[in-house]
Structures are given as structure tokens and as C-alpha cells.
Amino acid sequence: MNKFKLVFCAFLAVILVGGLAMAAGKSSTELGKQMFHNASLSGSANNKSCNSCHANGKGLEKAAENKKLSKAINKCLTGALEADKIDGRSVDMRSLKMYVQSL
């Protein structure tokens, strides 16, 4: 294989891997839903999930209006779930917010 083809193939591989990595890191309502129902979310020390206290979105009817939703989610995580905070800029937090807002 000549040098040009080798460089071209390497370039395509880098673009493909980068594109897949970006797709894997995409926020989604579906990911948020999975997290909402996950009893081990963010290292939860008990068997609770968000859904344990907010079954079918109970009490979250106005969540979409909350300008500090990330902070409210982290308060629940560190309180009721006995879990670690989630970075407000992460894919996980954006996905969880998207799902909560959809309720």
C-alpha cells in the first residue's frame, strides 16, 4: 500500500471513531428515563431510584419551569438516594433533565 493510501485510511479511521464517540455521548430522553428508574444511579447507597419517590412523574409537573433543575436533581440524589452529585454539564445530567421535563 502506498503512503498516500495509508494516510488516507488512517484519516478516515480517525473521523469514523470520532463520529462514533460523539454519537455515544449524545443526550437523550431515553437515557434519562433509564437513569430515572435506575436504583444504582450515581452510586446510590440504597435501593431507591428517582421513580421511587416520583412514580410516573408525581410531583414533577412543574419541573420544566425550574431554572435550577440540575441543582434540584442533585439535591434529591445526595438526599433521598444517598448518591453522588452529577455534573450539571454532563450527558447524564442533560439526559435526566430532558426526561424529567418530558414528564
Image (cartoon, helix red, strand yellow):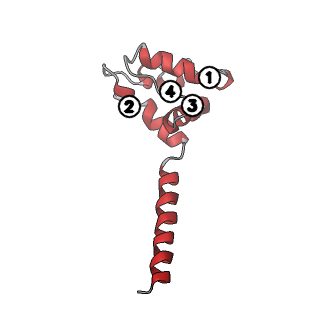
Earlier in the chain: of badge 3 and badge 4, it is 4
Earlier in the chain: of badge 3 and badge 2, it is 2
Using residue 90 as the reference point, say whether residue 47 is left or right of it. Answer: left
Q: Nearer the viewer, residue 68 or 11?
A: 11
Using residue 11 as the reference point, say whether residue 46 is left or right of it. Answer: left
Q: CA distance from mark 1 to mark 3?
A: 9 Å
Residue at image point 60% right, 33% down? 102
Q: CA distance from mark 1 to mark 4?
A: 13 Å
Instruction: Specify whether residue 39 is in view.
Output: no
Residue on which disc 2 sits: 38
Q: Nearer the viewer, mark 4 or mark 2?
A: 2
Asked which secondary structure carries label 2, the reply is: loop
Q: Quadrant of residue 63?
A: top right
Depicted 7 relative to depicted 73: above or below? below
- Which quadrant does the C terminus fall into? top right
Residue on which disc 3 sits: 97
Earlier in the chain: of badge 1 and badge 4, it is 4
- Mark 1: give few (<14), some (14-19) or many (20+) Cα within 10 Å: some
**Residue type (three-letter) at the residue carrying disc 1:** Ala
Q: Are marks 1 and 3 in contact (CB under 8 Å)?
A: no
Q: Which numbered circle lies on residue 56?
A: 4
Q: Are marks 3 and 4 in contact (CB under 8 Å)?
A: no
Earlier in the chain: of badge 1 and badge 3, it is 1
Earlier in the chain: of badge 4 and badge 2, it is 2
Q: Which numbered circle lies on residue 63?
A: 1
Q: Where in the figure is residue 16, as x and y percent of width and height?
A: 49, 65
